[in-house]
Amino acid sequence: MRAAGPRRHSRVRESDHVRAHVETKVRGIRGQLVTQQPGGEAAGAAAELQHHRGLREGAVGRKGVEGAALAEGSRVLGAADEIVEPSRLPVSDEPLRHSEVILLASPQRLAVAVLRRGCRLAPAGGGCPHSSERRLPPAPEVPEASLRIEPFFVEQWMNAHETTATWNIAETCVHSLTLDELLELSGDADGVLRRLRETWLGYGEITGSPRLRAAIAALYGARITADHVLTANGAIGANFLALYALVEPGTTVVSVQPTYQQLFSVPESLGAEVRELRLREEDGYLPDVDALRALTDERTRLLVLNNPNNPTGALIDEPLLREIVEVARERDAWLVCDEVYRRLEHEPGTTAPSVADLYEKGVSSGSMSKSYSLAGLRTGWVAGPREVIERCLDVRDYTTISAGVLDDALATVALEHVDAVLERSLEIVRGNLAAVDAWIAREPRLRYVRPRAGTTALVRYDYDVPSVDFCQSMFDLNGAFVMPGIAFGEEHSFRLGYACARDVLEGGLDAVSAYLRSLEG
Ligand SMILES: Cc1ncc(COP(=O)(O)O)c(C=O)c1O
């Protein structure tokens, strides 16, 4: 009935014994430097590494171990006479952009160091503060189930501050509606309430009610029907389903960055080599198609976009998106695009194109949270080819069963009155962005690429303060709450969420200005 999805356990084929062995070790001892003496096994592993991966003795490469579940930027030191000590690792002044796995193999021992993102490789005696140089006794075999994932910086920063912030200008949702306001927008509050009261509180339709899926499908072109839509627990649930369904270990995934961390950390945790396509300020944070093409190879199965982009608010127009689709097509790769900010374009008459409309292997995720200002409904979706919907369903059976029936009913009300909901949202974001523009113009040491869509902007500052310190000390001073740019690998910047209530935005911008004055003082 369903197309065969990727078989995750297929990576442990007999001929891949060494690869599987290495993967297991990498996953099991994250955060530590470990040496092991598994006798012949390590000698075999070292020989295999050299033989199969073409690594020269002592070589340091950025290519990682082909097919192994190492993070992007992983470095492999081939077979060496001795284990290389951390103090002899290459020195770098730049904080690491990704966690790095460093695998050292000698005829006697395997050693693996995992260096956390943000740390530096210091000269002799320094070392990474997050990687222990402790030597441990041989680690027990760790099953694959112990797979780890990077902590989600953005969500953790939000969780830590959002309830105590005075001025929450970090939030990315359009100022949320109350239930009363939604009923009001429907124009039929009594009818909606009556239907809610009569709702049968079972699991409901497993894939989402046909009425909701039809309303979601109407946000796309003719290719997407209700059968091409699957509801999920927010866009975060939708992204997870799509990524879990489509990422195969040992393949390469290219993801834009800066973006929502989930989009590259989940593929990384599933054993893909994630390559970062950095969006640059000088390009208006739009993807460079040649750079994208150069990052792909014959192992590329998936490209990941986020359009409109969080945090920059950049918008990929249809001609550029079609060029990106061509790159995906050349590799016969899936193209997943997080489109949670779609329909929040600032230029009247502009709508962000969807990958689901432009590409036969395009998969779009969306939700009620941002553009439709109903995050509390926790309703999102995947829209794409039937094959993907079926693969996602197989995953979703393990995580969701079905989305809540009341959420489903209220999301249906909102999307059946989508014009009224969006009119309110657009009024908020367009009006608020004008206020941000005026504020940026008054602050000579701030700059930004004006967002073309969405609810966020990446604001760069000209003060010699790391972004976490900047944001935390501002929060401590006056409760102004923004997101450190380092969450997106962009130092000396912060993400501003400007779709909040106007009084919160204005109070927040004043509070940021007061903090800037304190830095100058
Ligand atoms: C790009 C992006 N995707 C997904 C999400 C998750 O949104 P939700 O699960 O509320 O739909 C967010 C939230 O900030 C986001 O910015």
Image (cartoon, helix red, strand yellow):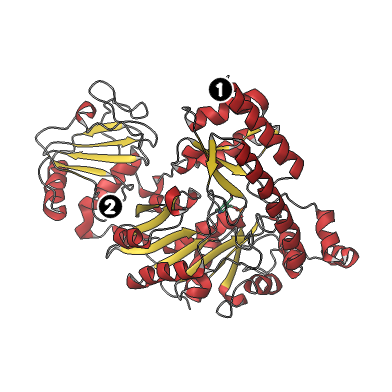
- Kindly identify which residue carries mark 1: 520
Residue 68 marker: 2
Q: Earlier in the sequence, mark 1 or mark 2?
A: 2
Q: Please tell me which residue lies in front, 171 or 368.
A: 171
Q: Is residue 264 visible?
A: yes
Q: If the image is split into quadrants, where does the C terminus sit?
A: top right
Query: How many discs mark residues in the rendered view?
Result: 2
* Residue 265 locus on image (x, y percent): 43, 49
Kind of element beneath mark 1:
helix
Circle 1 Cα neighbour tier, 10 Å, few/some/many (<14 / 14–19 / ≥20): few
- Depicted 205 relative to depicted 308: above or below: below
Q: Please indicate whether residue 35 sits to the left or right of residue 54 in the image.
A: right
* Residue 339 locus on image (x, y percent): 56, 61
Quarter holding residue 101:
top left
Quarter holding residue 93:
top left
- Tell me what residue is drawn at x 61 percent, y 56 percent: 234
- Tell me what residue is drawn at x 61 percent, y 55 percent: 454
Q: Please indicate whether residue 217 sits to the left or right of residue 99 in the image.
A: right
Circle 2 Cα neighbour tier, 10 Å, few/some/many (<14 / 14–19 / ≥20): many
* Residue 492 locus on image (x, y percent): 47, 35
Q: Please tell me which residue lies in front, 442 or 411.
A: 442
